Image (cartoon, rainbow, N blue to C red):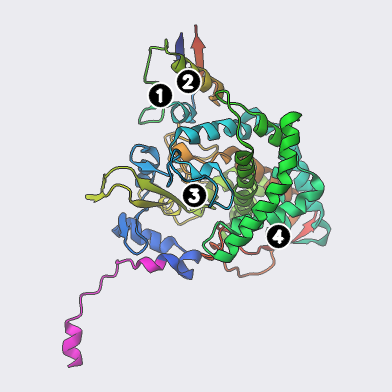
Amino acid sequence: MKVRIDLDKCYRSGECYYNHPELFEMSDDGDPALKVTDLTDAGMRLHAEQAAEVCPAGAISIEE
Amino acid sequence: MAEALQEQQPPALPNEIDPREFDGPAFQRDPFPLYKRLRDHHPLFHDRFHNRWVLSRYWDIDGAFQDNASYDRAVYKPDGPYQFGSTHVFGPNILEYGNSPQHRWLRNIVAGQFVGNRLQVFLPMVAQICDEVIATFKEAGEVELVSQFSSQVPIRVISNMLGLPRQDEDTFVGWYQALIAGLGFGGEHLARGIQARNEMWDYLDPLIATRSKTPGDDLLSRIVSAELDGARMSPDEVKGFVALLLAAGGDTTDKAIANMWFHMMYTRPDQYADVQADPNLWDDVFTEMMRYDPVVHAQFRHTTREVELHGRVIPERAGIILYLGAGNRDERVFKDPDTFNIHRSDLHMGRENRSGRYKDGKPGHLGFGIGQHFCMGYAMARQEAMIACTKLMAAMDTPQPKFDRHPGISSPSIDSGGFRSPQELVLTFNPV
């Protein structure tokens, strides 16, 4: 499972890194970045799924 | 002799700040001169009288909002002995929680209701309520905008969103005014606020029970039945959240609408002509109002560790006040900060971001806060204010302020809670 962030679509709402700081972090310019790449942990998968669901820009997708 | 004594007086310190200035009526009316002295001479002011540290520059406030490891909002620990809601006029609500998992859970269970498609479905109802309220005064050709319009619309919108019976709307108006006043420091107001809360809770109990069993499309049903990580909000948490919605969600939008009209009628009537020509500019009136003199001027934090700032050290567990209203006038960030200008090119216009970062590279206003505790109703507030102002403008031909002079926007007195707005705003117009 992989998380993809489309930075062209992203408008820096911040919802991913404020709601799921376990998985995402904020760069200085406000773009999100992945903190963790290993998503074998069930908790991390849940964070990824919830972040993809709440992203108002629809910029987060999950690839199996 | 008298001369000799005078010579021994300490030198005058013109930029010194007497912390009692924060409590006076002059500060309630016009806090901006004091904000400027803070920014220029005391960017980190230790207010020992109120036992707090004051931040007033834009990037210092942004820094505190962004730094969850050093600044927290909560006073009580979620797992400590404090019963959440027991001393708060709203009951247990999201504002009482700090940077905790409980806060994130409560926020996430409701936040999605106020953005995107879930918000869009409510907008036709907002327009209809505006029409109804406008119809009550339109033919008179005169309106006291605060009592007859801005304080009427948001509360009716929220009670409609919640699916509460329409015939009870006037009762909610009374309750929310008591709740808001109860946020202040006056004991009488608090007592009345708690009484209003208890009446409202008794009213809500049977409704919550029914909608938990047979949920409809309304917001109350969605809140009671929303699940996150397999759990729902408790009935008390639902009631606390409804109180928060009615009071904080209603009153802030109410004041935002009144402030926008105040600025268009008194501060920049020349720019009102621009808005008449292009009603989409109400969006920029909203943004500039939220910068120039936002509804909410201050947010509170405490430090969770020692923080170095401006060559000094704030101790751990120190109270912090972030003056958003001061940061928004920071001349280090905005040119001519004391000029209200909807055509400003150095401010991010349009929808706010919780991150406070924008792809156009411009700084945004601080009026909704930033970060973990960014206003949850930001999109709702903007859309509702836009609809309300556009509808009202369309109903009035050549609106004029009835009185040449106006005392201006002010904070309420310290003993009653609430937000910044004009007390009254009387307009005359030709009905359209």
Closest to the camera, between mark 3 and mark 2, is 2
Q: Which one is in front, B9 or B428? A: B9
- Which marked residue is nearer to the observer: mark 3 or mark 4? 4
Reading the image, the residue beneath label 3 is B291
Answer whether labels 3 and 4 touch (C-beta < 8 Å).
no
Q: Residue sitting at 81 percent across and 55 percent down?
A: B136
Name which residue type carries label 4: Ser
Q: As shown in the figure, which amino acid type bears the numbered disc 1?
A: Glu
In the image, residue B429 lies at what x, y percent? Answer: 75, 60
Q: Secondary structure at mark 1?
A: loop
Please, what is the three-letter code of the amino acid marked with disc 2?
Answer: His
Residue B89 drawn at (x, y percent): 58, 53
Q: Residues within 10 Å of mark 2 (few under 14, many from 20)?
A: some
Instruction: Look at mark 1 in the image and give the residue it sits on.
Output: A22
Give the distance between the C-alpha atoms of the residues marked 1 and 2, in whole angstroms. Answer: 8 Å
- Snapshot quadrant of residue B387: top right
Element type at marker 3?
A: helix
Question: Please, what secondary structure does the residue beneath circle 4 have?
Answer: helix
Which chain hosts label 2?
A
